[in-house]
Each structure stands twice: as C-alpha cells, then as structure tokens.
Image (tube, helix red, strand yellow):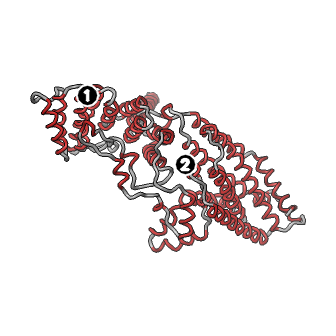
Amino acid sequence: MIRWIFILLWLGTLAGGQRLVTIRRRQTVGGGDVITRIFGESRALISARMLHKADRYFHGGVMLDNCDYLHGHAHHHEHTDDCGHGVDVDDEALARPAATGDDHYAGAGWYRRLILNTRPAGHTHLSTVREVKELLPWFRLATRLDPHNVQGYDVGAYWLAEKVNAPAKALALIDEGITHNPEAFELALTKGELLMETDPAAADSALAAAEKKWLAARKKFEEGEAYPPHLSPPEFALMERIQVYRAKCMLDLGRREQAIAFFQRALAVSDNKTALQERIRELSSQTNGWAPPPSDH
Amino acid sequence: MGKIFAIAKLSVLELFRKKDVYVAIVLALVAIVPLAVVNAFGIEGAVRYIREVALLLVWGFSVIICVTTSARQIPNETQRKTILPLLAKPVSRAQIALGKTLGSIIASWGALAMFYGCYIVIAGLKSGIWIEPVLLQSVILHACFAALACSMTVCGSLALTPSANITACLLIIAGGLLFGDHLPDLINKAPGLFRPPLIGLEYVLPRFELFDLRARVIHSHAPVPAGVFLFILLYGAAYSAVFMGLAAGLFKRKQY
C-alpha cells in the first residue's frame, strides 16, 4: 500500500512539475520553444543586443551613442499635412554635432591612429532600399529571440513600411507583435499609422484599440501597479498623437465634426496647443456647428 | 633553412592527417549555409549579416586551430619520445623550434585558405561581389595574426604545461580580440592600484585587435591606408620574431 502511495506521489509530482514548466514556458516565451531552450532567459538581453547591432549597421558599422535616428524614427515621422503638428527627426538628427565613433577608442597616439584606421569611421546612415535591407535580419532575430521586444516590432515595421516599401510585411510583423504583446498600445498605434494612408477606417479601428490600451496602461501607471518593463510608459504625448491621427482618419472619411472632436481631445493632453487650436478653428469655420464626440468612447 | 622547412613539412602533414581542419570547415558550413538560404521577412538582398556570421566563425575556428596545432608541436614529440631521435639528427635546437613554429604557421595558413575559400563562395553567391581590396587586406592581416598566435603558442608550450598553455593563449588572444579596443579606456578608468599591471599588459601583450578588419569588410568600407597596413604587418612580424627567438632560447635550455 505504501509503495503505491509513493508511486502516486511520484507521478503526481512529475505531472505537476511538467505542468509548471508548460505554464512558465507559455508565460515567458510566446512561441519559439527551441530558442528558449537554447538561450533561456538571456534571450531578452541578446534580443536587445540585436537592436544595437541594427543601429550599428545603420551607421555603416560605426558605434555611435548620440544618434538614435534608427529607433527614434518610429512614431516620429511627420503628418503635418493634415495634423498641424509633428516632429521631424531628420532635422533633429542633423542638428546634432556630427559624431564619428572616434570617442570609443582611447589610448596612446600611435595605437589610436592605428585602431581608427582599421575600424569603420564617419557618421553615415544607410539610405538606399538595398542598404536598408541589411537591417532586416537583425529586426527578425530580435523579435524571434524575444517576442516581448516591442521596440523590435515597432522599429522593424517602420523600416519595412517606409524604407523597404513592404507595408504588407510591416503589418504582418506588427500583427505578430500585437499577438505576443496584446497590451502594447504603441504597436496598435503603429498599426494605425501604417493603415492611415490606405484604409482610414481600419486605421481608426487600430487607433481606437491603441487608445483603450493607453488608458488601461495609464490607469495602472497612476495607481502604482506593477508595469511591464518591456512597454513604453503611457505618456500624454502618445495619447495626443493617437487623437491627432484619429482626427486625420475622420477627415479622410469625410467626418469633419468627429475630426474636430478628436482634435479637441488632443488639445486636452497637448503641450503645444497653438497649432491644434488653429486647426480646430479652421475646421470649425467650415462646419455648420458643433458635433458630439464619437460614440465609441 | 632546408632543415627548418623539412621539419615544418612534417607538422603540416600532421595537421591535415588529423582532420581537425575538415571538422572545423564542416561545422562552419553547417552554421552558415542555412543562414545564407533564409531571407528575413522573405525579402532578398541582405548580405552583411552573412558576412558577419561567416567571418566570426572563420576567426573563431582559426584561433582554435592556431592554438591547438601549435601547442602540441613540441609537447607531443616529447610525450612520444620522438624528440630524442630528432635531437640526435644534425639539426640545432633553434632550427627544430623554428621548424615547428613555421610548420604550425603554414598549417594554419592552409586552414585559413580553406576557410576564406568557403567564405568567398558563400558571400559571393549571396551578394554577387567576390573579392574586394579590403577583403584581401583582411586575409593578409589575418595570416599575419595567425603567424603571431602560432609563435606565441609554441613559445608558451616550452614554458607551460600543454593544457595551461592552451588556456592561457586562448584567453590572451580572445581577450585581445574582444576587449583589446577597450583596454586603454579601462586603464583610464581603473583605480590607482590596478593601473600599473594594466599598463604593463598594454605594452607587453601583442595587440591582436589591430589585425581584425572584419568590420571594414562586412560594411564594404575602403581599404586601410597602405602605410597603416604595412605598419601592422611589420608589427606582427616583429612580435612573431620575438616569440620565435624566445622559443629557440627556451628550447636550447630544455633538458631531455
């Protein structure tokens, strides 16, 4: 009898352990079991390293600390044609002092001269489609290694859509990112941005999802709840961008009153109110009166 | 000179008989070929990542082959007692030491030629660019690096036990390649007590990282200026000569 109890206990422990392993794997991996088995928890660090590598490739092999053009570009390209605001990172990047990567090499004069001559130098950015394709394997590796690398999906999708002219693949990457990170509002925002030019209705739907996720994240943030480290902090600037993009979608769909309502929402969280007020005034003068805000919020 | 080459020839034959190189090449191909076939996001045109991975493997395997081949040249002869008939022949101890070093250098160069042959074919098929001037410079400096690594290891094999020598040489070479660039910076930031030994390391150890032009090859940069290239070659040759001289001196004092 005791023997059977031991056997049952042993089997129960084995089954329980296996169950725990499975649950843990589901929680941390989100796919790619082989990768987890090989790299374990270090895969997040390696994944972040892959993005650094992409940055280095973008600068033609030069290590630069003071140029975040590659990562900073996502979410920052301007939509000033209709939105009346926007930040042009190209100008920001160009305005900075031109770094060349020389600062990474110290040492005696002879050594410094030799090492600088054997390493890539100068501040260049990959620009042609052929060159930008060189970055893609690192985005793919980064997101495969760590499906919670939200920045990897975000930046990768931007470069796929804007520079390689592959918007469908960019959307597929963003959808993959959303599947693994359903709470990441920045991915929904990027999806909205990607769809804005071709399908304003779908873009608005993605942006509405981004807004909901942002609000949930903001609530957690303000209540001091544990906030996932792989997600961006829910800053008001991002909410402003969501509202402005939704307004643009409404304008594209011919719903001027709703566009005004979204601009007003953006105004409530904006630091730079003048341009938005001007846009609202301009649109209001074209309408016959005030319209209620859209009903989905 | 003829005697030195005769001893060297034996060492070369031994390396290829033991098939270490072929194993390394097969391992490298197993790692590179699937990578070369896969296209990220189904978009063709990326080649730099292949160059990066392939060159990393070429360097990694070449370091292992240089060190393991050189480290067992004289200790193996001693262990098998074949060193005694060799010493009985009309060759000086210095000639034996030089012949053994030269043999391991030539064997390492043979392995390098095979590795780079595979690299050129894979990268060339993927990119359509076969041999750039900077790649030629990189191969020549890599060969110089191999000569230096072999000389250092043969010299170490006469002062240390084989396992200690292999470990020390691998650590010094890998450390130099990985962190050599940062050593001056490390010295600047180190607390006072640690600075003198670090400065000593900076001046005594050869700077292996100078021979590594991978980053320029991967990103298709212009070749290194001729003056700099020649200076690094001379630097490598001078250090190799110092290690060969030390090895000859140590071997002369060895008791059998």
Residue at 18%, 34% (x, y): give it. A262
**Looking at this view, is A199 or B192 the one in front?**
A199
Q: Residues within 10 Å of mark 2 (few under 14, many from 20)?
A: many
- Side of B199 relative to B146 (left or right): left
Do the residues bearing badges 2 and 1 touch, measured as CB atoms within 8 Å? no
Chain holding disc 1: A
Q: The N terminus of chain A appears in which quarter of the rendering?
A: top left
The picture places residue A12, in percent across and down from the top left corner, at 42, 30
Marks 2 and 1 share the same chain = no
Residue at 44%, 71% (x, y): give it. B191
Q: Quadrant of residue B197?
A: bottom right
Asked if residue A49 shows in the view, the reply is no
Of helix, strand and loop, which one carries label 2?
A: loop
Q: Which amino acid, mark 2?
A: His
Q: Quadrant of residue B243?
A: bottom right
Chain holding disc 2: B
- Side of A129 relative to A87 (left or right): right
Of helix, strand and loop, which one carries label 1?
A: helix
**Looking at this view, is B240 or A258 the one in front?**
A258
Asked if residue A222 shows in the view, the reply is yes
The picture places residue A266, in percent across and down from the top left corner, at 19, 39
The picture places residue B106, in percent across and down from the top left corner, at 76, 55
- Side of B116 relative to B174 (left or right): right
- Side of B235 relative to A104 (left or right): right
Q: CA distance from mark 2 to mark 1?
A: 43 Å
Q: Which amino acid, mark 1?
A: Asp
Q: Is residue B195 above or below residue B32?
A: below
> Which mark is drawn over residue B219?
2
**Looking at this view, is B120 or B89 the one in front?**
B120
Residue under pointer 1: A252
The picture places residue B187, in percent across and down from the top left corner, at 49, 69
